[in-house]
Image (cartoon, helix red, strand yellow):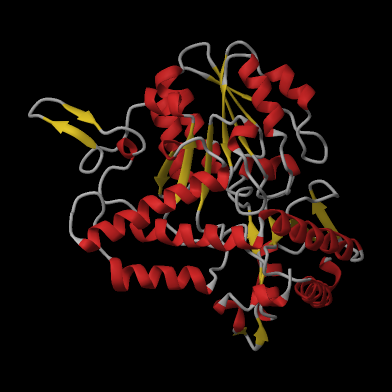
Amino acid sequence: MNLDVREQFPILQQEINGHPLVYLDSAATSQKPRVVIDALQHYYQWDNANVHRGVHTLGSRATDAYEGAREKVARFINAKSTQEIIFTRGTTTALNLVASSYARAVCGEGDEIVLTPMEHHSNLIPWQQVAKATGATLKYITLQPDGSVDLAEVEKVVTAQTKIVAIAHVSNVMGVVNPVKQIAEIAHRNGAIIVVDGAQSAPHMKVDVQDLDSDFYAFSSHKMCGPTGIGVLYGKKALLESMEPIEFGGEMIDEVGLYDSTWKELPWKFEGGTPIIAGAVGLGAAIDFLTDIGMDNIERHESEIASYAMNRLSELKGITVYGPRTRKVGLVTFNLGDVHPHDVATVLDASGIAVRAGHHCCQPLMRWLNVNSTVRASFYLYNTKDDVDRLISALIQTKEYFGDAT
């Protein structure tokens, strides 16, 4: 990756607190390239209309753009059909849709839902609610000392009583890449389905849902250079057809009577109301942008930056890094001695460096790590080794500022 990529992101051309911005919080949300910003502006300036309803020119343009974005998503993750692509508000909404519609219908007393302690709250709380509502039991795959998942442990936990395995493709704290293809095989062999949280994978690596054999796969636009407020639920067609919608109103209906109604076919039966049209347009532009660069190139670049960051962090005394030593994705999570992560992030911000501090919506994982919170630096295609060097220099200054606390 070269500096030309960085120059396509207007927000990165500014100074923060008198220093050039170093943005290391892409795991929370990515920045947006000019082509995405322009696509949103073009839609609102020239094509703004509701979709699927009007026969006028603007309505046709908007519909073509909206459904064209769905086609881009389907190609991006290699879905069999656009009918398997549901637009949602984001990963959280997508996972809640599966939990509320599919899981509550199939789970009951004696059934099991299998998770890991590394799950983001969005892929944990919905399943807690399903268990409470249906009588199903939550079971957890034991993590290895470095935070990874051992398939032998998966074999122990997944049984004939397991209905659902829900797991993150990539941990948003430790950078662990879970073997979801092999876990899917184990789940299917036991008669279960697998739900994959792809929020931290779809932006950073090539995803093939057919090769992974995932039954459901959820991800968000805003983490992959697209706008906020839109995400994707991929689901195998047969499963989606078996599910009932959980939002009712316009757009998702076929026939409405005074006492009963019927639903449109996939994917529209799950997209009640005016959909997120501009968001879809922006997501489509982001997919074009990422595809032009190449997902393999992005993954290779991030791995290189993360490895460099791990090596530089290892040079500092008092730094504790969490997760595997080898990183395939661009994030590192650490603590600086006894200094509170929020204090570290505040000092770094004074140097124009944006990182995330807190529990990262993974409180059970924080307890597993025996900490309350951590600092996370996450990289994307626009970051460079110079950004890492700026981070290390600022951490050295932070150590000096807090003295013996480190």
Residue found at x 36% / y 61%: 278
Q: Is residue 279 visible?
A: yes
Residue sitting at the far bottom: 18
Residue 56 placement: quadrant: bottom left
Residue found at x 65% / y 79%: 21
Task: State left or right for residue 121 relative to residue 369.
Answer: left
- Place of residue 124 in the rendered image (x, y in percent of width and height, measured from the top left): 55, 36
Q: Quadrant of the C terminus?
A: bottom right
Task: State left or right for residue 264 relative to residue 293.
Answer: left
Q: Quadrant of the N terminus?
A: bottom right
- Name above or below for residue 372 compared with residue 184: below
- Place of residue 299 in the rendered image (x, y in percent of width and height, measured from the top left): 72, 55
- Place of residue 277 in the rendered image (x, y in percent of width and height, measured from the top left): 34, 57
Residue found at x 71% / y 37%: 178
Q: Is residue 353 visible?
A: no
- Place of residue 403 in the rendered image (x, y in percent of width and height, measured from the top left): 84, 73
Residue found at x 41% / y 29%: 240
Residue 14 placement: quadrant: bottom right
Residue 388 placement: quadrant: bottom right
Task: State left or right for residue 192 relative to residue 131.
Answer: right
